[in-house]
Image: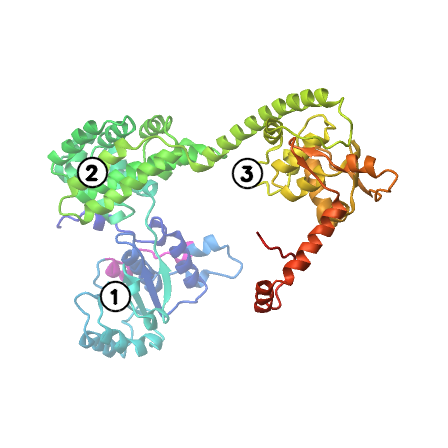
Amino acid sequence: MSYLVIARKFRPQSFSSITGQEHVTKALANAIARKRIPHALLFTGPRGVGKTSCARVFAKALNCQNSQVDKITPDLEPTQARKLVEPCGECVNCYEIAKSTSLAVREIDGASNNSVDNVREIIESLRTMPPSGSNYKIYIIDEVHMLSTQAFNALLKSLEEPPPDTIFIFATTEPHKIPETVISRCQRHDFRAIPEDLIFNELKQILLKEGTHLADEITDLIARKAHGSMRDAQSLLERLLAFSSDDIDLPTARQLFGAIDVELFFQISASVFAQDASGCFEHLDQAFSESIDIRAFVAEFLSHWRNLLVLKNASLGKKKMSSRTLCKLLGTSEAELQRLQLQVENVSNFDLQRVFDVAEAAANRALSSDCPRFALESALAKMASLPSLKPLPELLARLEELEKLSLASDRVQNRSVAQARAIGKDSEPRGMTSALHPSDIAEAHEQSAPLEGDHNETPMDLKPSREFSPSWEAFVAHVQARSEVVLAAHLRRVSADVFRQGELLIRAGKFDFESLNTAESRAAITRCLLSYSGCEKWKISFEQQALPTKASAETKAKRSSNIVEGSIVHRDLEKQQEEITKIDAEAREHPMVKVALSTFTGSKIDKVSILK
């Protein structure tokens, strides 16, 4: 008897022996047990995961001569029912299907039988009954996506309404190439890539049956190189066993498979973190001197940086992952996991993400470049020269802390200055509007300068925590510093009869009284008092000064004329208002003004004057 390779020798012969596809095998077994067998099935998934093998097992379970499906009762547990569905593997039908010699099960290669004539032959054979001893005729079309569009169209009618004893099973790795009209007529089952730990366990069972021993590191290497394909793993194992029947060490296995030693990637990442570009070039030159497969190298290179990034983020999470879970997630051994943890221990997640982005871009360029080595060298030089940076949220948080410390320091200093100014001005008469020196205004501006973005409002969390200083001059300067120019001008001309914590009584002339005693002015004064004193509730009152009598004209004149900055004498407010009104009336009679007023008809003009 000729030699059978491992992939054929250990091909699954039952639902339970199909590894990693329990979601499919359970559905098929339950369909047989409940007698809800579909007339067309579509098996999709990566290569070497058991699509064709599952189709054969399904065909054997339907045509098994020792089938125990009739023994299944409604009250039987699902697990027991699935065991009764399993094919015996010993009857004639099971034997012929396993050897691909059964007349009831026809396996067709869609790549070589993709024409309309081939499909017509299938349609003609549908008229015949199943062979004696078989329950169904089953057509297994592998790589069905290779059929032409005309062939698919010719198959549609028979696929939708086949004879009751006929079943179609399609297998493909590219379901997107199959017309939707075909997919809609099939019951679809998606096969998944097989996890590495399941491949590892299956290989250990095969080695045990073959009477051969391999180190776990080599078996794990084969499982990782298979990338989820059991057939690829079995082929790699076959290749390794054909190379030598004796024990094989890990370096030999890596050399045989063309795998890059993981030590090389640890050395490259260590040079990158040490910002040693020359070391990166040396390690890369070592890899290319061994005539590596560029696709395999790029895949392993990017996988290494991915493992570092994933491990760093996993360590930052609230829920810590066990070493076993991390090894399964990263596809590494315990020893490699410890080395990865040591490398990312002193590297920030932000820097690691930046390095990975460069590595990913380099991998894409290397695969599409005629000179992949140059692309990798350029990327390594950039990765090794990246400076360590802090993420933007962290920088903003640090700036906020510094700003809070600066505000606290300024508040302490302003409190001392305010107390000193209050002590020096207690002797001044309350309500007098004496002249302020420019240096006093500048100092008051420093005490009460609004923060950026204040917009004349003081947030509750930025209220000054200081003792109230009842200095009217300082308060007026504070209003001026807050860019309340008009309000400050009015307050300079009034008298503060009462100015203490929470209470303010202002005595003003008619003009200032009418200007200040409004809702808008009261709100502005309240805001300024809040930012000046820190007190939220203020009782603000206004009193209008009486007009001067003839008996006290001289006294009233002296009281109403205050010197500002030592040279400007204010006239009586009412006389000043009459003078302004007279000038406005005379100006409106001027010919040129009349022309201007007639031109801008409908406009609101508050004041007219003629400059001489």
Alpha carbon separation for disc pair 2 and 1: 44 Å
Indicate which disc residue 452 carries: 3
- At label 3, the amino acid type is Glu
Helix, strand or loop at label 3? It is loop
Of callouts 2 and 1, which one flags the residue occurring earlier in the amino acid sequence?
Answer: 1
Q: Position of residue 158 (x, y in %)?
A: 31, 77
Q: Quadrant of residue 581?
A: bottom right
Indicate which disc residue 378 carries: 2
Helix, strand or loop at label 2? It is helix
Look at the magenta stretch and give its main secondary structure.
helix
Q: Residue furthest right?
A: 551
Helix, strand or loop at label 1? It is helix
- At label 1, the amino acid type is Val
Q: Which residue range is magenta in the image?
A: 83-98
Residue annotated with mark 1? 144
Determine whether, in the image, residue 327 is placed left or right of residue 177. Answer: right
